[in-house]
Amino acid sequence: MIRNFGIEVGGPLIKDHLFCWAGFAPRVAHTHVFRELFPITDAMGTIGPELSQYRRRIDETHRTYNYAATLDYVPHPDHHLTLALWGTPASNNQMRSFGHTEAHV
């Protein structure tokens, strides 16, 4: 399940001279991976049967926070100064721990 939404605001702070804009759009994705274990291969490269008692479904949550902002200053029609800030910090909990997982058979 993926959830996205966004919001933005902007407008003049001082008419014809100072303008601002800011936006924020987080994204949260809930997914899963399967962990499967096989015994070590032999000298011939043959893979043994899966060790099904160690098969696990591991839930993951990825979060990304997209943001941006600008501040525009126009002291004279021939001069324009823009200050901009943007980023996409992200975090997730993927494959960090096998505790609290359900067995998937």
Image (cartoon, rainbow, N blue to C red):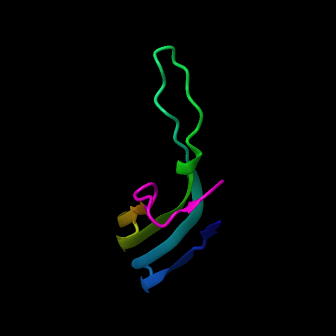
Relative vertical location of residue 51 with respect to residue 24 in this rendering, above or below: above
In front of the other: 54 or 26: 54
Q: Position of residue 21 (x, y in %)?
A: 46, 75
Give the residue displayed 58% in from the left and 38% down from the top: 50
**Main secondary-structure element of the magenta-colored stretch:** loop
In front of the other: 32 or 29: 32
In front of the other: 15 or 100: 100
Give the residue displayed 60% in from the left and 73% down from the top: 5
Which part of the image, by quadrant, shows the N terminus?
bottom right
Q: How many marks?
A: 0
Relative vertical location of residue 83 with respect to residue 43 in this rendering, above or below: below
* Residue 10 is a magenta residue: no
In this view, the residue farthest toward the bottom is 14
Give the residue displayed 55% in from the left and 68% down from the top: 28
Q: Position of residue 94 (x, y in %)?
A: 46, 57
Relative vertical location of residue 84 with respect to residue 9 in this rendering, above or below: above
Give the residue displayed 44% in from the left and 68% down from the top: 68
* Image-quadrant location for residue 87: bottom left
Relative vertical location of residue 34 with respect to residue 60 in this rendering, above or below: above
* Image-quadrant location for residue 103: bottom right
Which region is colored magenta?
92-105
**Left or right, 50 with reference to 42:** right
Q: Position of residue 40 (x, y in %)?
A: 46, 29
In this view, the residue farthest toward the top is 44
